[in-house]
Image: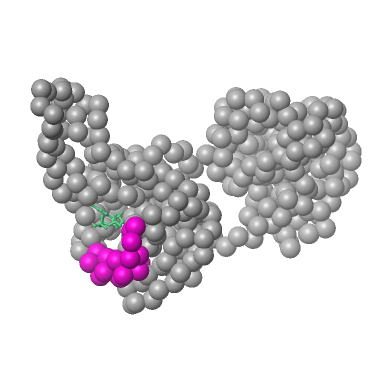
Amino acid sequence: MLNGKNILIGITGGIAAYKICELIRMFKRANANVRVVCTPNALNFVTKLTLQNLSQNEVGIEEFDLNEFKPEHISYADEADIMVIAPATANTIGKIANGICDNLLTSIACAFKKPVIAAPAMNCGMWENKFVQENIQKLKNAGYTILEPESGYLACGYEGKGRLCKLETIFDKTVEILNSKKNLAGKKFVITCGGTIEEIDSVRYISNYSSGKMGIALADAAYEQGAEVILVSTVNVERAYKVEMVKSANEMQIAVEKELNNADCIIMAAAVADYRAKNIADHKLKKTESNEFTLELVKNPDILKGLCEKRTSDKPVVVGFCAESEDLIKNAKEKILKKGCDYLIANDISRKDIGFSSDFNEVTILDKNGGIKPLQRAAKTEIAKEILKEIYG
Ligand code: CTP
């Protein structure tokens, strides 16, 4: 299953370190090459000799080896296809999240550019700690796969969330990542997300309830499948790929159109305001004596339609979304023709269990040849994969 794959296991100083002996055996049985690197504290829980015998390789602990020509952290990082840090203590997670490299393991992690899985294990109070959670979030944002700890009886005597997840979970995730097809490698995606923000004056704006979750899920899925991704976003999000922050429809249009000739696929998942204030006041508008207030609006550019009109060949593939609260398919059929895009993802925004702000969606994919494919309600992360599969097979 893992023939010829090079797995670097990083063990840190927690009681669950002893369990990693079995994980090494699982990887070896699947024909992987395993190298182990430990923090000095990990050796309080498991011996170097055991790890060496099981991995059939020298175990790395010290950062500087005088017999080595190349700095050790670089050669470890170069060799491995994936790094699996398990158990990952709060201490090591904190160091990696903040770029601290004070031992071989943290130095390797800092230099590592390939996928990293981290399986935290610690006391439940430590797991709930605000700073630990912030550090976990930083790692997630940087593209780390975090296998969350499980709840149960902890070695420290407490009951709660903090136990290392099952070894099978770590093994399966490693196999999944190493064997995942990078079928979008070499392709460039530009994906928009969030609701545009149209200023009225220095303190007020017009916007909508779009959370950006669907666009982010699409960008994550494309990136995981090897694509170069630019996410043009109105919501603040940190990712390993490029995120370009914009506010208004005009800014979004500029950001997207500058990639029109370079992109292989543009997905307009953003909820773009149809209108903006005709004049944006420099200062806060003051209340007047009148009981009425009229705000003059002008039409925003239709970014999606413009992209389809401006492209000079069938590249990029252009995908639109379609938010409807009634007559979903009828309106979607009209919209795909009006916009001229290759695919239109129709979703019913009147339903509370899907769409705006929800983690779930239920969509119908229309294509320019009249094809209609309904997808069942599922997590947006799953819907995103299905949409990419529909476009690229
Ligand atoms: N869109 C766009 N520019 C706009 C409005 C919408 O690029 N000014 C894009 C959206 O990102 C989406 C698609 O067009 O991919 C459809 O958006 P939707 O809100 O469903 O439709 P509208 O074109 O705004 O039409 P209506 O609001 O009348 O349904």
Quadrant of picture, ligand 1: bottom left
Q: Is residue 325 magenta?
A: yes
Please name whichever residue, 71 or 144, is drawn nearer the observer in this view of the structure.
144
Span shown in magenta: 324-343
Image coords of residue 388 (percent x, y): 46, 63
Image coords of residue 266 (percent x, y): 34, 58
Q: Is residue 202 left or right of residue 97?
A: left
Residue 66 visible in rendering = no
Q: Considering only vertical position in the picture, is 124 above or below 218?
A: above
Please name whichever residue, 78 or 177, is drawn nearer the observer in this view of the structure.
177
Residue 305, located in which quarter of the rendered image?
bottom left
What kind of secondary structure does the magenta stretch mostly adopt?
helix
* Residue occupying the point 52% across, 39% down: 141
* Residue occupying the point 44% across, 39% down: 237
Residue 378, located in which quarter of the rendered image?
bottom right
Please name whichever residue, 360 or 98, is drawn nearer the observer in this view of the structure.
360
Image mark count: 0
Q: Considering only vertical position in the picture, is 183 above or below 208?
A: below
Q: Considering only vertical position in the picture, is 359 above or below 278?
A: below
Q: Is residue 336 left or right of residue 106?
A: left
